[in-house]
Image: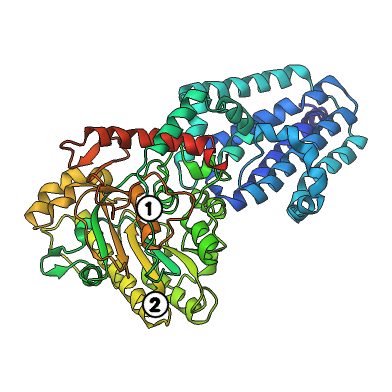
């Protein structure tokens, strides 16, 4: 018969010795849970979160291996609490973990203690309470963690973590890949602990721009053609309404397939004599997709060459259309989106763009949903926006404003619920193409109904309304659909990665058929809004400039458009991508 009392005693001894590891593991997992509450719980489905938390807990339990006394381990736990809580507080203000350089600026917090205290939450007490519980437990159960079992388990954990990181291409690559995800960009901290965030920050620390690089940027900026002066005799618009339609491509406008007019409302709008319409706006978004489109249109900058600007540089300086309207017209700015403010870090970047009011996912009722993530469908979205405007909750009548509306229903894979479909196609149309056109038709109707509402407002004549796609939508599926599109009589523009640029109430209407880049929309809007005296004119060239070459350089650095005799301009546009990258990375517009 085994001695069960001795077995129980051994189990208790092992547990007593392992308590420090268990408490530290609880701290990391509690931190992860609170962090993910503000971001996304997707990190909890990754192996990194659990392995790094366990490894960190084992390493921080070293004082219990070296000393039987309680206070060395309690001191390490208390410091860990301060570190983790500080990162939670920092995220609530800056939407990121504490960067390495900021640890040396802790003394600056003395003047901001009220703000610091305000960022604390009741749930944060879980961390110090666990330390107190550990101290009380150790007062009755003193036990030192045996060094051989601790060293064996810790060594295995460290070796496993190192092997997994090496197999994944290295820590820098694995952590950096998260910044290309709309939802996982903020998950690096829980997946690798705040220590991983510090390591990544040190590995990617950007040195200051060299004198030669700065000179190249300044030379390029000096070479930009100036905007035409404002027409002092014409009344300037006081309000700018921007509708960024998810994945809206140009070829659907004017298309008629199997007797179905795909975008009847947009077709009518582009036929109006006061509408400026450019159908061949080449996609220039990069890793950030939708949020990159906002940078191109609102700031006239091209996305960074690697990563996502809204995640890497959310607090840099961005002169924008909302800021121009606030400075020159006293306008209030609004961002209306059915997505969450954390998606692509758009809450933080909207603040840097000068947006005053953000209405996002929690501010709208999910009366009708669409898309893989079940977001508010475009029809219901525009209806609720109208309701808020009619009630004066946003943009009261006759007030200057910047209003940005970001739709969602056009998001891939373009599967619209049956009850929202307004048109149907035969099996002769490929399913993906049919789904895309059906969704575009639905969004077209929603936009048209909203424009009908705007026309009823007394301030309609003082509005400039921009409708554009945030980026192309068919992506890698396009080549396989080109032949089908030709068979169905769809425009040859189907083969290009073009989004439409539709400007209502332009006062300089007409169609501009030449190729342009998304970055060219910013100076065009500045000119149409008569904001030429705003300090930043962007990196693009106004579509109203008669000297503009009808070419653009896309996100793949391919030149598109009329390239005959335009090699010098093509080279200048290629360099614009590097210039913009440096401007954003080194925050040159703050200098």
Apparent side of residue 253 relative to residue 162 in the rendered image (left or right): left
Mark with earlier residue (1, 2): 2
Q: How many marks?
A: 2
- Choose top left, top right, bottom left or bottom right for residue 385: bottom left
Which residue: 42% across, 62% down?
374
Q: Is residue 410 visible?
A: no
Q: Is residue 28 above or below residue 41?
A: above
Is 391 placed above or below 104 here? below
Dot 2 falls on a residue whose secondary structure is helix
Q: Which residue is mark 1?
A: 523
- Return the residue found at the far front: 233
Label annotation for residue 175 = none
Q: Nearer the viewer, mark 1 or mark 2?
A: 1
In this figure, which residue is indicated by the disc labeled 2? 460
Identify the residue at the far right of this view: 139
Give percent across and percent down for residue 327: 54, 60
Q: Residue furthest top?
A: 148
Please give the name of the residue rendered at 91% of the width and 27% of the height, measured from the top-left corner: 69
Name the spot of residue 82 as percent of width and height, x first: 78, 40
């Amino acid at each position: 018969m085994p001695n069960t009392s001795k077995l129980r005693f051994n189990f208790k001894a092992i547990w007593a010795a392992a308590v420090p590891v268990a408490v530290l593991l609880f701290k990391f997992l509690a931190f992860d849970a609170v962090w993910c509450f503000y971001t996304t719980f997707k990190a909890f489905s990754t192996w990194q979160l659990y392995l790094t938390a366990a490894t960190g807990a084992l390493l921080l339990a070293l004082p219990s291996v070296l000393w039987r006394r309680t206070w060395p381990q309690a001191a390490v736990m208390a410091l860990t609490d301060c570190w983790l809580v500080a990162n939670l507080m920092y995220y609530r203000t800056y939407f990121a973990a504490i960067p390495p350089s900021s640890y040396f600026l802790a003394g600056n917090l003395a003047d901001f203690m009220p703000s610091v205290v305000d960022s604390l939450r009741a749930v944060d007490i879980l961390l110090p309470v666990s330390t107190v519980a550990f101290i009380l437990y150790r007062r009755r159960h003193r036990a030192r963690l045996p060094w051989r079992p601790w060293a064996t388990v810790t060594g295995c954990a460290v070796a496993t973590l190192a092997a997994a990181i090496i197999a994944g291409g290295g820590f820098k690559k694995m952590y950096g890949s998260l910044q290309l995800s709309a939802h996982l960009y903020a998950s690096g901290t829980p997946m690798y602990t705040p220590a991983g965030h510090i390591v990544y920050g040190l590995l990617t620390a950007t040195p200051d721009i060299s004198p030669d690089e700065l000179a190249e940027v300044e030379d390029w900026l000096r070479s930009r053609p100036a905007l035409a002066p404002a027409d002092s005799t014409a009344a300037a618009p006081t309000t700018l309404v921007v509708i960024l339609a998810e994945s809206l491509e140009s070829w659907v406008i004017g298309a008629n397939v199997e007797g179905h007019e795909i975008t009847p409302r947009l077709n009518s709008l582009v036929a109006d004599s006061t509408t400026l319409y450019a159908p061949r706006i080449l996609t220039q978004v990069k890793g950030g997709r939708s949020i990159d489109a906002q940078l191109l249109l609102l700031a006239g900058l091209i996305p960074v060459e690697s990563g996502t600007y809204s995640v890497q540089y959310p607090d840099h300086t961005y002169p924008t259309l909302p800021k121009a309207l606030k400075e020159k017209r006293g306008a209030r700015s609004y961002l209306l989106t059915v997505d969450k403010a954390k998606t692509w870090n758009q809450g933080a970047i909207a603040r840097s763009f000068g947006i005053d009011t953000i209405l996002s996912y929690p501010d709208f009722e999910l009366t009708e949903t669409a898309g893989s993530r079940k977001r508010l469908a475009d029809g219901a979205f525009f209806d609720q926006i109208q309701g808020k405007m009619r009630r004066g909750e946003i943009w009261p009548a006759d007030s200057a404003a910047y209003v940005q509306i970001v739709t969602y229903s056009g998001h891939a894979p373009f599967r619209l619920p049956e009850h929202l479909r307004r048109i149907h196609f035969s099996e002769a149309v490929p399913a993906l193409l049919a789904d895309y056109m059906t969704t575009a038709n639905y969004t077209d109707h929603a936009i048209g109904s909203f424009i009908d509402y705007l026309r009823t407002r007394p301030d309609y004549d003082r509005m400039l309304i921009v409708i554009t796609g945030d980026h192309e939508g068919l992506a890698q599926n396009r080549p396989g659909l080109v032949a089908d599109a030709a068979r169905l009589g769809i425009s040859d523009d189907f083969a290009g990665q073009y989004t439409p640029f539709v400007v209502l109430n332009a006062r300089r209407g007409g169609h501009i058929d030449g190729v342009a880049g998304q970055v060219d929309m910013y100076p065009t809007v500045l000119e149409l809004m008569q904001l030429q005296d705003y300090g930043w004119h962007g990196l693009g060239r106004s579509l109203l400039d008669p000297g503009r070459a009808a070419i653009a350089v896309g996100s793949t650095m391919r030149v598109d458009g009329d390239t005959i005799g335009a090699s010098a301009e093509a080279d200048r546009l290629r360099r614009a991508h590097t210039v913009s990258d440096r401007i954003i990375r080194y925050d040159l517009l703050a200098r």
